[in-house]
């Protein structure tokens, strides 16, 4: 409960947790470590899974008619985007906390981002950070920085590539700084006793990175290399074997059995 609240006040750091698992999210566990050294009176965490965020219907009325207003949903009492949009654009730094879902983000987080469209102008201008690319300018925004914290189920870092590119691109067209990212592959490891040392070292470095972001405003590729080494770089095979043993056990418990051809591949 250290950072949670839901009211009118705007905080310097806004953590947007896009996991449908809300408070049980493993990514959020990492994000909370990262936020540990930020002044907690300046942080708000929002679980999008707890909010009503209807999907953008693509009507484009927000661009040409009543501005900064979603003509489909803003008049419904249960939609939370009106408040969320204000908090988002008035904060200084948004920390996106998200699992990888099919190389991208969960649909509920995508709905949130799509609904920010109503704060864009319809005009096309040259993107400030890359003139060869067009973008829509934002109407009113105090947002300066975006940071990404992501977790995924597979143990390799490659699975984060499309997601990191997405957020780098998103920061660029929004003309805000991309401060960097923290990636946590093989997230099940966080609840496996056998990897408790890796978990401890990983989370303690994540915590120190939160401090660094306040001091230097950047997490570099070198920092990420340190994280990778601390994590379980040399134990991927072991992780895969344990994860498969767990899955087989679960299936057998339910007497669902497993195809013999698959079993022979689980090494
Ligand atoms: C629908 C769905 C799609 C997923 N897609 C991927 C994927 O493409 N790559 C991957 O490594 N993990 C994938 N995962 C696993 C999650 O990324 C992983 O369990 C994550 O750590 C969950 O984070 P959370 O606890 O914060 O929700 C997927 C999980 C679900 C439910």
Image: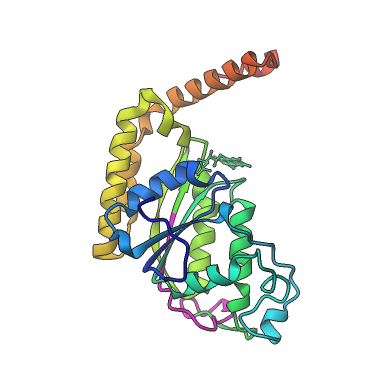
Q: In this view, does 165 lie to the left or right of 142?
A: right
Task: Depth check: give the residue in front, 26 or 6.
Answer: 6
Q: Is residue 247 left or right of residue 40?
A: right
Residue range of the region highlighted in magenta in the rendering: 128-148
Q: Which residue is drawn at 66% across and 73% down?
A: 74
| 63 w.r.t. 26: above or below | below
Task: Depth check: give the residue in front, 248 or 116.
Answer: 116
Main SS of residues in magenta: loop
Task: Depth check: give the residue in front, 18 or 153.
Answer: 18
**Quarter of the rendered image showing ligand 1:** top right
Q: Position of residue 60 (x, y in %)?
A: 72, 77
Does residue 130 belong to the magenta stretch? yes
Q: Which residue is drawn at 69% across and 62% down?
A: 55
The answer to whether residue 144 is seen in the rendering is: yes
Does residue 53 belong to the magenta stretch? no
| 57 w.r.t. 98: above or below | below
| 201 w.r.t. 44: above or below | above
Q: In this view, does 57 lie to the left or right of 127?
A: right
Q: Position of residue 102 (x, y in %)?
A: 62, 45
């Amino acid at each position: 409960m250290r950072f949670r609240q839901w009211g009118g006040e705007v905080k310097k750091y806004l953590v947007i947790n896009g996991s449908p698992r809300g408070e049980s999210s493993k990514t959020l566990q990492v994000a909370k470590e990262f936020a540990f050294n930020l002044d907690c009176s300046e942080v708000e965490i929002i679980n999008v899974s707890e909010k009503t965020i209807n999907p953008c219907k693509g009507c484009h009325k927000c661009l040409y008619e009543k501005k900064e207003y979603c003509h489909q949903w803003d008049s419904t009492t249960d939609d939370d985007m009106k408040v969320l949009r204000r908090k988002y654009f008035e904060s200084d730094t948004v920390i996106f906390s998200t699992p990888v879902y099919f190389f991208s983000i969960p649909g509920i987080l995508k709905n949130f981002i799509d609904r920010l469209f109503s704060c864009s102008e319809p005009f096309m201008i040259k993107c400030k950070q890359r003139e060869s690319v067009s973008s829509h300018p934002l109407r009113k925004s105090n947002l300066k920085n975006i940071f990404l914290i992501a977790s995924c189920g597979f143990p390799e870092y490659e699975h984060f590539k499309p997601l990191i590119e997405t957020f780098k691109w998103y920061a660029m067209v929004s003309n805000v700084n991309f401060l960097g990212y923290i990636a946590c592959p093989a997230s099940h490891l966080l609840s496996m006793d056998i990897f408790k040392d890796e978990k401890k070292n990983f989370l303690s470095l994540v915590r120190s990175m939160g401090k660094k972001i306040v001091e230097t405003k950047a997490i570099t590729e070198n920092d990420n290399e340190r994280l990778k080494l601390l994590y379980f770089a040399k134990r991927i095979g072991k992780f895969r074997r344990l994860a498969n043993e767990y899955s087989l056990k679960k299936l057998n418990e339910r007497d669902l059995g497993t195809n013999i051809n698959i079993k022979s591949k689980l090494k």
